[in-house]
Image (cartoon, grey):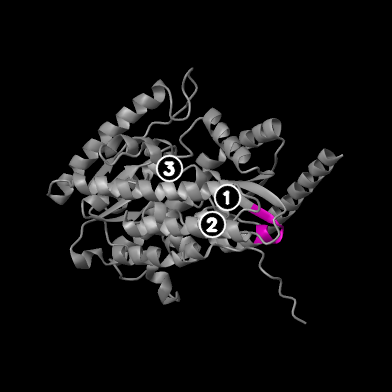
């Protein structure tokens, strides 16, 4: 007898097709040396519009670690990092990418991992070309601010490095808040000045004048793509939701580090069009949506498809999340191609882990109201304390102010060993039972 259970998740077809754009981008990075391009490694904020304008190839550390984990190819890099002395409690994004640095340095571009018995695809971990220079611009995370310095040491302190300092936004003084107040204005000016210095550094590294017109064009494309993305996200307030958090995870690469281009604009236009079509035809993202929840925490890249199916099979639509909805050019109205630096500086500052508790709570609760959510799923990311630290207080605020239930489960961004399925399963069932009880009481 066939006991196969139908998958209740219904992912967007456009985001599935977007995988080729990502694969093409990475192949372009791997072959940069063959075209005579200089290569920059960077972490944290999306500085790629500058690199693209300068004709560089760019490798985003978190992005490559996430790609390895999503393809279940992270172990060679993590083993190399472990043998180099990096402990398992270190941010698994950083640990994975540092392992790639070790492999790249030791074996050379495309030279293989040196680990016996691995399939050819696992050689991906060592395919990054060695960097000509590093740039760091990390907000809200102490590990991130040291990551490139450690990479600098892995390569023998011979590779130039530039750091953009992004101050934490506490938001505690009268008049201070999300993108308003004296603290905000001072931080914006401070970062804008550093971006001008970054341009000078890039000119020194490339030996040619920076192309400001190209930067303006990149910002124009990003603004258009971001606006379409935000409009498409807003449509998901519809019930049942036409797309989920997992769909937005699938398009993070595109908005975060792929080249700014008309193709990028058309990609997000296609996402919006598919969502509009789903609403018009009554096609849901979860075939039997009974619950609508928020996801707080960086996603577990090793478990994306698995978790999308698991929640859907419980009738749970994960509609939005702090990582997807409060990051990645999320305020397109401040982007100005004619004067790009202030708008770029503002986006680098509003990273979702770069705010004090007051603003963080306000932003999460705003999303819960906007999407009419029943609960919050907190992924207590084992090696990302910056995201995990405020979660208990956010949960209390959501319960107090909105009557919203919460659940916590432990996992990690790029290390599958921290995830325990039985814990998620039991806590999810308990949260859904609590939602049912609250609904029954409200109906009396």
Q: Which mark is residue 143?
A: 3
| Direction from residue 292 to residue 109 in the image, left or right | left
- Nearest to the observer: residue 130 or residue 246: 246
Q: Secondary structure at mark 1?
A: loop
Q: Work out whether 428 lies above or below 404.
A: below
Q: Quadrant of the N terminus?
A: bottom right
Q: Residues within 10 Å of mark 1 (few under 14, many from 20)?
A: many
Q: Nearer the viewer, mark 3 or mark 1?
A: 1
The stretch in magenta equals 310-317
Q: Position of residue 183 (x, y in %)?
A: 40, 23
Residue at position x 45%, y 52% from top? 93
Residue farthest right in this picture: 444
Rounded to the nearest whole Å, what is the CA distance between mark 3 and mark 1?
Answer: 34 Å
Residue at position x 45%, y 76% from top? 117
Q: Work out whether 243 lies above or below 180.
A: below
- Nearest to the observer: residue 195 or residue 393: 195
Q: Name the residue carrying label 1.
A: 236
Tell whether label 1 touches label 2 (CB within 8 Å): yes
Q: Name the residue carrying label 2.
A: 275
Q: Residues within 10 Å of mark 2 (few under 14, many from 20)?
A: many
- Nearest to the observer: residue 312 or residue 166: 312
| Direction from residue 240 to residue 173 in the image, left or right | left
Q: Position of residue 427 (x, y in %)?
A: 72, 50
């Amino acid at each position: 007898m066939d006991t196969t259970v139908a998958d209740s998740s219904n992912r967007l077809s456009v985001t599935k097709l977007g995988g080729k754009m990502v694969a093409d981008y990475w192949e372009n990075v791997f072959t940069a040396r063959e075209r005579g391009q200089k290569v920059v490694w960077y972490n944290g904020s999306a500085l790629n519009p500058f690199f693209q304008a300068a004709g560089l190839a760019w490798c985003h550390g978190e992005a490559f670690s996430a790609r390895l984990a999503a393809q279940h190819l992270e172990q060679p890099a993590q083993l190399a990092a472990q043998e180099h002395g990096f402990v398992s409690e270190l941010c698994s994004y950083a640990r994975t990418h540092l392992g790639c640095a070790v492999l790249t340095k030791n074996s050379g571009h495309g030279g293989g991992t040196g680990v016996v018995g691995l399939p050819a695809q696992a050689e991906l971990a060592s395919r990054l070309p060695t960097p000509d220079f590093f740039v760091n611009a990390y907000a809200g995370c102490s590990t991130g601010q040291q990551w490139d310095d450690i990479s600098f040491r892995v390569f023998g302190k011979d590779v130039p490095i530039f750091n953009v300092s992004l101050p934490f936004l506490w938001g505690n003084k009268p008049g201070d808040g999300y993108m308003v107040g004296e603290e905000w204005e001072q931080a914006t000016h401070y970062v804008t000045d550093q971006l001008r210095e970054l341009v000078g550094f890039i000119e020194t590294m490339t030996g040619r004048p920076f192309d400001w017109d190209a930067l303006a064009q990149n910002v124009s494309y990003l603004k258009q793509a971001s606006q379409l993305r935000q409009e498409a996200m807003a449509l998901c307030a519809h019930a049942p939701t036409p797309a989920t958090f997992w769909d937005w995870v699938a398009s993070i690469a595109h908005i975060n580090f792929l080249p700014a281009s008309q193709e990028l604009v058309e990609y997000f236009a296609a996402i919006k069009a598919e969502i509009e079509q789903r609403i018009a035809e009554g096609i849901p993202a979860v075939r039997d949506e009974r619950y609508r929840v928020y996801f707080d925490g960086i996603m577990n890249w090793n478990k994306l498809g698995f978790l999308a199916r698991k929640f859907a099979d419980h009738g749970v639509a994960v509609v939005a999340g702090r990582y997807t909805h409060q990051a990645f050019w999320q305020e397109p109205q401040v982007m100005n191609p004619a004067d790009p630096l202030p708008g770029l500086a503002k986006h680098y500052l509003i990273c979702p882990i770069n705010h004090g508790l007051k603003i963080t709570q306000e932003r999460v609760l705003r999303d819960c109201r906007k999407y009419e959510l029943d609960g919050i799923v907190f992924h207590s990311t084992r090696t990302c304390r910056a995201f995990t630290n405020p979660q208990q207080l956010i949960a209390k605020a959501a319960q107090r102010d909105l009557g919203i239930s919460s659940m916590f489960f432990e996992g990690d961004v790029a290390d599958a060993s921290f995830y325990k399925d039985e814990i998620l399963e039991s806590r999810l069932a308990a949260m859904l039972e609590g939602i049912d009880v609250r609904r029954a009481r409200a109906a009396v």
